[in-house]
Image (cartoon, rainbow, N blue to C red):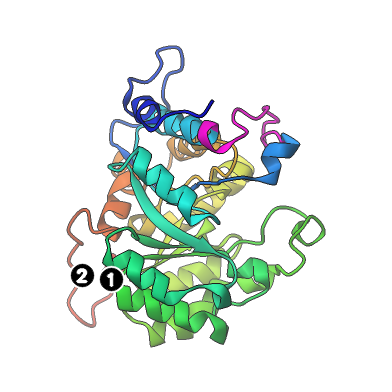
């Protein structure tokens, strides 16, 4: 029997279980990278957590949504950007928890996107974000001309765009993603895009791993760009994740880093992602609260943007 919307909302808003202490800070968290599904072959195959081996806790849409909401409550996530290949499934998440879900339209192939449909969704107030844009899985570079209508639309509608830059799971080309290429995840491929679209509200998903130095160069040149740390915060060895995150922080970009989980079909990945940030002893409490909440709040315009330095001055703060 399916879980009712009222029951799902109750799960999200209920007090966290006393048997499982939360790893989250007192500040709320915004998760910029959550997935919804109507169906998924991994549910059928009962694929356990790829890091811990934990058996699946949910194997259909309703159970997965309920388990993800429970994980959000457990870790103090107050809002989440939710996307998926099935837009209707995302809208069902919004219906279940309207105050907690930002609706995002995800896709891989930009040539199959109905731009007028997205304009209408924005006009009626349903569309909040465009992404996850997984064009890298289609072998399409960020600066490919096929992407240009997507960037132009995001700028026209003034909605954030989340772009996947990551080589995918280990052995991706041999396990179902034959078109993906790691070289297409280089953040510097976005340079001309950002010059053409200076008002594009872009966040680079997965922080462009493993191109740390190129990402820093891009952040330095284009203060409007943010990054999320989704998936690398729970699938990468902790030491590697901290090497990458610390590099961004020590380069001066702690105010441009967004928390994300990319929980996919494993809701417990949310707990793992939060714990990874919490374990970063080189982050100050303010830097943690910025990464968990305030950076995303500014990016999503829930909080006022920080004023920038005078024109011509050196600055790394977000515009």
Left or right, 188 with reference to 123: right
Can residue 195 be seen in this snapshot? Answer: yes
User: Which of the pair 150/200 is nearer the observer?
Assistant: 150
- The alpha-carbon separation of the residues under discs 1 and 2 comes to 7 Å
Left or right, 126 with reference to 209: left
Question: As displayed, is residue 196 above or below residue 77?
Answer: below
- The quarter of the rendered structure image containing the C terminus is bottom left
Query: Pointer 2: what residue?
Result: 308
Query: Pointer 1: what residue?
Result: 315
Q: Position of residue 291 (x, y in %)?
A: 36, 48
Which residue is outermost to the front?
1
Q: Position of residue 84 (x, y in %)?
A: 52, 53
Question: As displayed, is residue 277 above or below residue 319?
Answer: above
Tell me which segment is drawn in magenta.
47-63
Main SS class of the magenta portion in the image: loop
User: Which of the pair 54/234 is nearer the observer?
Assistant: 54
Which residue is outermost to the top?
19
Q: Contact, CB < 8 Å: mark 1 with mark 2? A: yes
Secondary structure category for the residue under label 1: loop
Q: Residue at x 63, y 33 (%)?
A: 59
Question: As displayed, is residue 227 above or below residue 76?
Answer: below
Q: Position of residue 102 (x, y in %)?
A: 35, 51
- The quarter of the rendered structure image containing the N terminus is top right
């Amino acid at each position: 029997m399916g879980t009712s919307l009222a029951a799902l909302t109750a799960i999200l808003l209920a007090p966290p279980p006393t048997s499982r202490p939360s790893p989250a800070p007192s500040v709320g968290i915004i998760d910029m990278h959550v997935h919804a599904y109507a169906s998924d072959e991994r549910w059928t195959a009962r694929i356990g957590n790829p890091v811990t081996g934990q058996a699946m806790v949910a194997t259909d849409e309703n159970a997965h949504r309920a388990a993800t909401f429970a994980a959000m409550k457990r870790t103090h996530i107050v809002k989440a950007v939710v996307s998926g290949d099935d837009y209707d499934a995302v809208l069902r998440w919004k219906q279940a928890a309207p105050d907690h879900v930002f609706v995002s339209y995800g896709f891989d192939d930009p040539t199959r996107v109905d731009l007028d449909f997205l304009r209408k969704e924005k006009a009626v107030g349903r569309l909040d974000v465009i992404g996850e844009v997984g064009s890298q899985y289609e072998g399409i570079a960020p600066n490919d001309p096929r992407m240009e209508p997507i960037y132009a639309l995001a700028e026209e509608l003034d909605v954030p765009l989340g772009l996947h830059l990551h080589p995918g799971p280990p052995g991706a080309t041999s396990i179902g993603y034959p078109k993906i290429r790691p070289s297409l995840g280089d953040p510097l491929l976005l340079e001309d895009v950002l010059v053409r679209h200076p008002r594009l509200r872009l966040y680079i998903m997965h922080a462009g791993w493993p191109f740390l130095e190129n990402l820093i160069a891009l952040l330095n040149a284009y203060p409007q760009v943010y990054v999320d740390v989704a998936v690398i915060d729970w699938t990468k060895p902790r030491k590697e994740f901290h090497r990458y995150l610390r590099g961004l922080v020590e380069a001066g970009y702690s105010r441009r880093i967004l928390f994300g989980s990319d929980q996919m079909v494993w809701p417990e990945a949310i707990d793992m992602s939060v714990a990874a940030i919490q374990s970063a002893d080189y982050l100050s409490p303010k830097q943690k609260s910025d990464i968990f909440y305030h950076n995303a709040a500014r990016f999503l315009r829930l909080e006022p943007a920080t004023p920038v330095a005078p024109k011509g001055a050196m600055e790394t703060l977000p515009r």
